[in-house]
Amino acid sequence: MIDVYYPYFEREAAWEELRYSLRSIEKHFQFEFRVVIVGDLPGWINPDSVLHIPHERCEGMQENTLYDAITKQLLFNAHFETSLHFIRMYDDIYILRDVDLGEVGQFKAMYGYDQVPTRKGTWWDQLYHTLEVLREKGYPGWNTETHLPELFNKEKMQWIINIYSALENRLLTSSLYFNTFFPSARPVLFSKDFAVQCYDNIDGPFYFSSEGDLIERFNGKTYLNHNNAGLNDNLKSFIRTRFLNKSRFEL
C-alpha cells in the first residue's frame, strides 16, 4: 500500500478542487493506495477514509507558501504510519485516464537548466536559487517542478531537506530530489501531448486555454492542473462532468 500525500490549506482553495482530485485518483489510479492529508481537513471528508496530520499554516512569514509546503512535508516524513514510498499530489491536479504506479513514478521535468526562462516573482527566485545550488554541486539542474504527481522515498526526501537546509534556504524539494538522486537520468520532458495546464486561461507552449470544447481539446491526456486564473466556469463544468461519482473519501 502506497500513500498519496496531499498538503492542504483550505483557505487557499478557490473551489472544490480537492473533492474532484480525490475522485480522479479513485477512478484512475490502478494500484492500492491510502490518502494522507497534512494540514486542514475539510468537513465533507470522511475522516475514517484518510490519515489526517493536522498542521496550522505559518502566517505573516516571508515566502510562507514554500515554508508551509516543506513543514508539511517534514510532518509527513516524521509520522510513523506513513509509507516509505509515497506520491505527492496537490488539490488542483486531476488524473484523466488510467495510470499505473510506474507511469506516475516517471522522472518528469519541465526543461533543462539552459531553457529556464527569465521571470520575476518569489517562486521564480526560489527556482533560480535551487537550480544554481544544484549546478554548483555538479548536478544537471533539471527543473522538475511540473505540478504533476511525483513518486518519492520519504527517507531520501528527509535527507534532501536536511543536507540542503531546504527549509531555511527556501529551496524547491522536487528539483533537489531528482537532480541529486538521478543525476545521469534523462527525464520525460513536459509535453502538452500528455499533460494539460490551464494557467491564466491562455494558449502557449505549456498552457491550454480554459475556453471552448474541453472534451475535445483534452482527449487522450493523462494529467490536468490549473491555477486560479485558469479555473473558469467552463473548466469547472468539464471537471464536474468528468468526475460525477462520489468517492469513498466523501461523507
Image (cartoon, grey):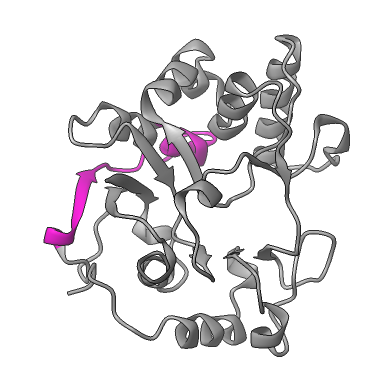
Q: Quadrant of residue 132?
A: top right
Query: Is 250 positioned to the left or the right of 208 in the image?
Result: left
Residue nearest the viewer, comparing 108 with 162: 108
Please state the horizontal and vertical placement of residue 86, each as a whole percent of the image: 38, 40
Q: Quadrant of residue 18?
A: bottom left
Inspect the magenta stretch and tell me whether residue 243 lies in it: no
Residue sitting at x 35%, y 29%: 74
Q: Residue furthest left?
A: 48
Please state the horizontal and vertical placement of residue 32, each as a whole percent of the image: 30, 54
Please state the horizontal and vertical placement of residue 124, each as a whole percent of the image: 71, 39
Residue 89 to residue 142: above or below:
below
Q: Which residues are magenta?
A: 47-70
Residue sitting at x 29%, y 80%: 246
Residue 116 to residue 19: above or below:
above
Residue 67 to residue 163: above or below:
below
Residue sitting at x 70%, y 9%: 137
Residue 7 visible in the snapshot:
yes
Residue sitting at x 71%, y 67%: 200
Residue nearest the viewer, comparing 210 with 123: 210
Residue 39 visible in the snapshot:
no
Inspect the magenta stretch and tell me whether residue 48 lies in it: yes
Please state the horizontal and vertical placement of residue 180, each as a whole percent of the image: 61, 19
Residue nearest the viewer, comparing 117 with 183: 183
State how many labels appear: 0
Residue 191 to residue 182: above or below:
below
Quadrant for the C terminus, please.
bottom left
Query: Is 51 positioned to the left or the right of 148 in the image?
Result: left
Query: Is 151 positioned to the left or the right of 174 in the image?
Result: left
Residue nearest the viewer, comparing 117 with 189: 189
